Amino acid sequence: MSRHLLLMPPNWIGDVIMAQPAMRAMALHYRQQGYAQITLCGRPWLADLLPFLNLPDAHYRARLPKAERAVLFPNSFRAAWQCRKAGVKEIIGYRGQWRRMLLHRALPHRISLQHEHHRQFYLDIARQLSVPIEDEHVSLQVPEGAIEHAHELMAMHGIAPERAICIAPGAQFGAAKCYPEDGFKLVTKKLAAAGWQPIILGMEADIPTARLILSGITTPSWNAAGTTSLTQALCLIAASRLMLCNDSGLMHAAAGLQIPTVVPFGATDPARTAPDGKRVEVIYQPADCSPCLQRECRVEGHPCMQNIPPRMLYEAATRLLEGA
């Protein structure tokens, strides 16, 4: 009977991508150790994200399998309890959350999430399991047919692929991470005037913001907020020339796909959650209250974002577009 490895990734898209180097190292290592099946189990959107994660022979399942070994990236009691109920023979994860008795191997916290990058926090799970790590950086892949699919979507909305740029003005965690709408509008208008064709990505809740950003732009553009699946959004990002966005899951996806990425930081700390990519410009002009790590800004005027003039974002975007 073939051995089965279960990986339970984190619960947010951005964290899954920051955990990608650790999961890839484990997938490669355990395949060499004779584990014929590698399963990711977690949030339903993992099914859309997995083809981009570059994890050899890994598959998504909505329900936990009865695996020989499970490695848990979430710190929750619930994740460990689910594995126990599923009959997993060996459960491994960080200690804490009252779950130590549920784990067969409880790992100590050697990396501080308060001071070090989340990617290193996840990589330390692999290190404590003596898993070789060939590459500590995020290395996403573009699935076969993804670019062609993106070009078809762009053509349906009059977007020329060689001029397409993506803009994601939302952030699922909360408004404190969001750059002002008027600032996005000004930057987008200037990029459109320079011949670039914006595609606005986001959730249904981002539709009004997307409309405001695109208002007054007469060149080709597409308000795709709330109309695309995660797979489609990732395809569009992979086929675009630039990503301009807040600290979000799509930010990590764009950087990991090596798409030039510009991102303003304020409420969060780039030393802990900056995107990992070769062509990334993080704009951080912290206020006295930065980083607050709050969902909503509690200081009048949202100073951490107001400290970043639109000119800085536009100049960073132009540098990356000219160097692409």
Image (spheres, grey):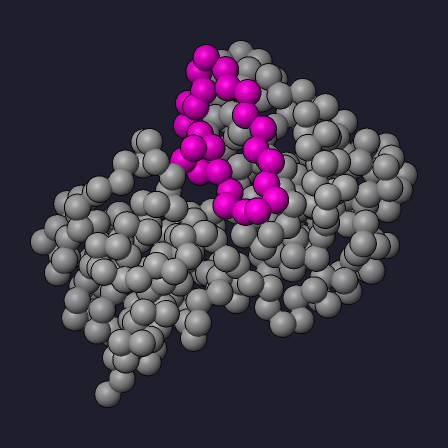
Residue 189 appears left or right of 54:
right
Nearer the observer, 214 or 72: 72
Above/below status of 109 relative to 123: above
Instruction: Name the residue located 81 percent from the left edge and 32 percent from the top edge.
Output: 189
Nearer the observer, 297 or 310: 310
Instruction: Name the residue located 38 percent from the left edge and 60 percent from the top edge.
Output: 134
Instruction: Name the residue located 61 percent from the left edge and 44 percent from the top edge.
Output: 279
Instruction: Name the residue located 33 percent from the left edge and 64 percent from the top edge.
Output: 26
283 part of magenta stretch: yes
Above/below status of 83 relative to 203: below
Image location of residue 173, percent across then percent down: 47, 37
Image location of residue 130, percent across then percent down: 23, 60
Nearer the observer, 35 or 6: 35
Q: Quadrant of residue 93?
A: bottom left
Quadrant assignment for the N terminus: bottom left
Residue 229 appears left or right of 155:
left
User: Can the viewer see residue 9 in this picture?
Assistant: no
Above/below status of 57 relative to 142: below
Residue extending farthest to the left is 101
Nearer the observer, 36 or 297: 36
Image location of residue 4, percent across then percent down: 28, 76
Residue 309 appears left or right of 118:
right
Q: Quadrant of residue 232?
A: bottom right
Residue extending farthest to the bottom is 1
* Magenta-highlighted residues: 269-294
Image location of residue 113, percent across then percent down: 31, 36
Residue extending farthest to the right is 218
133 part of magenta stretch: no
User: Can the viewer see residue 186 in this picture?
Assistant: yes
